[in-house]
Image (cartoon, grey):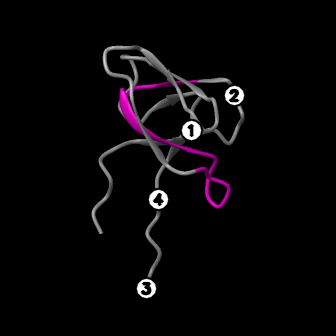
Amino acid sequence: MAEHGTPHFHNDSGVSTIHIGAREFMCIGAKPPFDHPHVFLDMGADSEIVCPYCSTLYKYDPALKAGDTEPAGCAWHDTPKAA
């Protein structure tokens, strides 16, 4: 299975704003099994966007790498399960 190239972010900590290093990403709300539908968000030329499901405000920070967040730990990486 190929890894996804689109960063996925969650807000388990319940902060109002997460700074990210990507303008296109997926918001999953909380970590599974408490996640909301995984929604693709695209800021376009804007520097911020609000998730329509969980109301988390995401702000683009060009100083961060694509999968990095501030506060740290808000990136989600799916771990494939062994068959």
4 in the magenta segment: no
Q: Which residue does the numbered mark 3 point to in the structure image?
A: 83
How far apart, in angstroms, are the residues tagged by discs 3 and 1? 28 Å
Which of the two labelled residues, at mark 2 and mark 4, occupies the earlier sequence position?
2
- The residue lying furthest to the front in this view is 52
Q: Position of residue 47 (x, y in %)?
A: 41, 14
The residue nearer to you, when weighing 27 against 75, is 27
The amino acid sitting under disc 1 is Cys
How far apart, in angstroms, are the residues tagged by discs 2 and 1? 10 Å
Q: Quadrant of residue 74?
A: top right
Q: Position of residue 19 (x, y in %)?
A: 51, 22
Are the residues tagged 4 and 1 within 8 Å (C-beta)? no
Which of the two labelled residues, at mark 3 and mark 1, occupies the earlier sequence position?
1
Q: Which residue does the numbered mark 2 point to in the structure image?
A: 15
Q: Position of residue 34 (x, y in %)?
A: 68, 55
Q: Which residue does the numbered mark 1 point to in the structure image?
A: 74
Which of the two labelled residues, at mark 2 and mark 3, occupies the earlier sequence position?
2
Q: Which residue does the numbered mark 4 point to in the structure image?
A: 78
Residue count near mark 1 (Cα–Cα under 10 Å), binned few <14, some 14–19, many ≥20: many
Q: Which residues are magenta?
A: 18-36
- Which residue occupies 32% across, 58% down? 3
The amino acid sitting under disc 3 is Ala
- Which residue occupies 36% across, 26% down? 23
Q: What secondary structure is found at the residue carrying circle 2?
A: loop
